[in-house]
Image (cartoon, grey):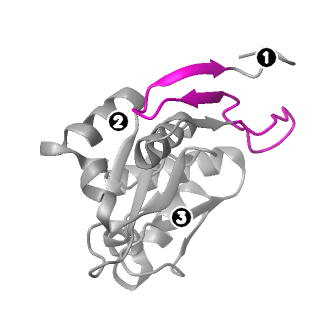
Amino acid sequence: MYIASRLVGRLIGKGGDTIKDLQRRSGARIQIDQNYPEGQPRLVTVEGAAQCVRAGVELVRSLIGNSPAVGNGAPGRLATFECPKGLVGRVIGKGGETIKHLQRASGTNIQIDQSGGPGQDRPVTVTGPPHWELLARARALDAQAFVVCASPARNPDSAYQAYGHSVVVDPWGAPLERCAGLAMGPGAM
């Protein structure tokens, strides 16, 4: 899972006491990757037996609360990409209408880090349910062009499960066609 950089201190605690306590209580090993630029969400890895990992994730979540920059730990559930500073206003929209609409329509939470310097791209973090279609819609809006996103092949035996839906999006961000990956061949969409 990912957590906002400002929450790392709360998770570690004074002298590492908090994270040690979470590890003791859950039986899982909890690590925070600090090799990220300042202000970027940090990857928190919870390892161990399945029941220990579940307990560790729940303890971490309860400690840091419902921060918008917290991923849910499931594969394919978080995306971070760069948005050119000049386009941030278009993504947010007047009074935040566009970003609110994208969040409602997709069931995700979208955070744009505005702390960068002049002219620097802004990191955008998307958390929530599968974000594949949302990314296609954002790309279409950004480019003002039709976008076709072909989903990766699915492997039921893999630890990572792809979303499995290909999508065609118009320049206004509206999905025109979706394919759940069940049909094959010409005209499947």
Q: What amino acid does circle 1 point to?
A: Leu
Residue 151 belongs to magenta span: yes
Residue found 32% across the figure and 58% down from its top: 87
Local crowd size for mark 2, using a 10 Å CA cut-off: few (<14), some (14–19), many (≥20)? some
How far apart in space, not on screen, are marks 2 and 1 (Cα)?
27 Å
Q: Nearer the viewer, residue 185 or 59?
A: 185
Q: Is residue 70 left or right of residue 157?
A: left
Q: Which residue is mark 3?
A: 44
Q: Is residue 183 left or right of residue 29?
A: right
Local crowd size for mark 3, using a 10 Å CA cut-off: few (<14), some (14–19), many (≥20)? many
Quadrant containing the C terminus is top right
Q: Is residue 29 left or right of residue 90?
A: right
Q: Which residue is mark 1?
A: 182
Local SS, label 2:
helix
Among numbered discs 1 and 3, the one appearing first in the sequence: 3
Label placed on residue 7: none
Q: Identify the magenta region.
A: 150-179
Residue 31 belongs to magenta span: no
Q: What amino acid does circle 3 point to?
A: Val
